[in-house]
Amino acid sequence: MKKSVAVTITESSQTGEARRVAVALATRLGFQETERGKVGIVVTEIANNLLLHAHGGVLLMRSLQQDSRIGIEILSLDKGRGMVDVDECLQDGFSTAGTLGNGMGAILRLSGLLEIYSVPNQGTALVAHIWLDSAPHQPEKILEIGAICLPIRGEEVSGDTWASEVDCCRSLLLVADGLGHGPAAASASEAAVRMFQEHLHRSPGAIVEAAHAALRSTRGAALAIAEIDFEQQSIRFAGIGNIAASIFSFTEHRHLLSHNGTVGHEIRKIQEFSYPWYANGILIMHSDGLSAKWQIDRYPGLMQKHPSLIAGVLYRDFNRERDDVTVLVAKGMGR
């Protein structure tokens, strides 16, 4: 499931809803009773923390797949008072709310990954991963991906989508935004993903061209595809429409260029652009459901965090709330 599920947490009854959503997702993914219990505990503790320390926030959940590993990502976002010392907050017995102070420690022990980005008086983003195999083999990664994909409020499905294919030499990433909202928009963006999957051996421009032919019977879509070549340390990019993309290193920031048009209907020109890629580079792609006014350098230390936290903070602070939204972040792991 590339797309996320969101549960708003503003009152105690919504903690139970979040737990039910998480356990239902775990069940669909094949988690057994003990593992489902872990998922439920982690989500409950995170939701309780949102109420106790931030007066509410949002939980985003999605499935994870890494090689043969299956897991769940839980992303918590709030605009509360934040944490002054994250390490201290993770210790058992530490509490600022008069509780026993064991919640964060429980989350840490039950999660395969727990990472937090917090700024006092600005809020907190927390990401936790729980894997179906409690002690999985973790192969060395060359690229880490984080993503959020949500429909506009009132719709069951998002007209946006994203896809990725990562191997040791080359990675392809896609963001598509079907015109409008709802099932017809989703049909257009999913058709673009099918072309992406059928033409993985081809260049970004060639995949966009194939998608243009395949989407003629749909509403059409904005589409962007990036290819990262790890051996050549380069990135090729082809985009049509309003999918924004930027690459960052610790010394450089570039916006990637797209052409106007609608894939499946009207394209004046398909063109690939090439840029340098760095081993510790970050690629951020997003649909126009996210405002383009963000500046990552206004978030000290965020670039060093997990890409899901980067995606989450940008979504929290720049979601337009009047459109489907997708944020895809790919982060080089320094090799």
Image (cartoon, rainbow, N blue to C red):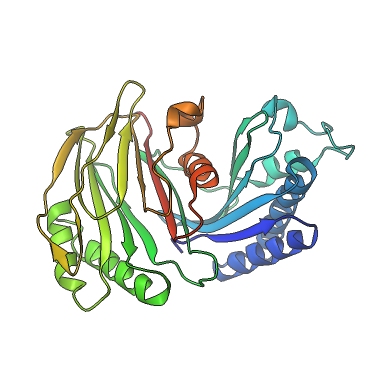
Horizontal side of residue 309 vs 185, given as left or right: right
Residue at coordinates 82% horizontally, 31% vertically from top-left? 94
**Which of 174 and 219 lies nearest the eye of the viewer?**
219
**Which of 130 and 86 lies nearest the eye of the viewer?**
86
Q: Is residue 198 above or below residue 61?
A: below
**Which of 181 and 278 lies nearest the eye of the viewer?**
181
Hey, which quadrant is residue 119 in on the image? Answer: top right
Q: Position of residue 309 (x, y in %)?
A: 52, 40
Q: Is residue 70 above or below residue 285?
A: below
Q: Position of residue 279 (x, y in %)?
A: 31, 29
Hey, which quadrant is residue 19 in on the image? Answer: bottom right
Q: Quadrant of the C terminus?
A: top left
Q: Position of residue 226 (x, y in %)?
A: 24, 47
Horizontal side of residue 228 vs 177, given as left or right: left
Residue at coordinates 67% horizontally, 62% vertically from top-left? 36
Residue 132 appears in view: no
Horizontal side of residue 152 vs 281, given as left or right: right
Residue at coordinates 63% horizontally, 69% vertically from top-left? 24
Horizontal side of residue 156 vs 208, given as left or right: right
Q: Residue furthest top?
A: 251
Q: Is residue 44 above or below residue 127?
A: below
Q: Position of residue 289 (x, y in %)?
A: 42, 54
Residue 59 appears in view: yes
Q: Is residue 260 above or below residue 122?
A: below
**Which of 251 and 93 lies nearest the eye of the viewer?**
251
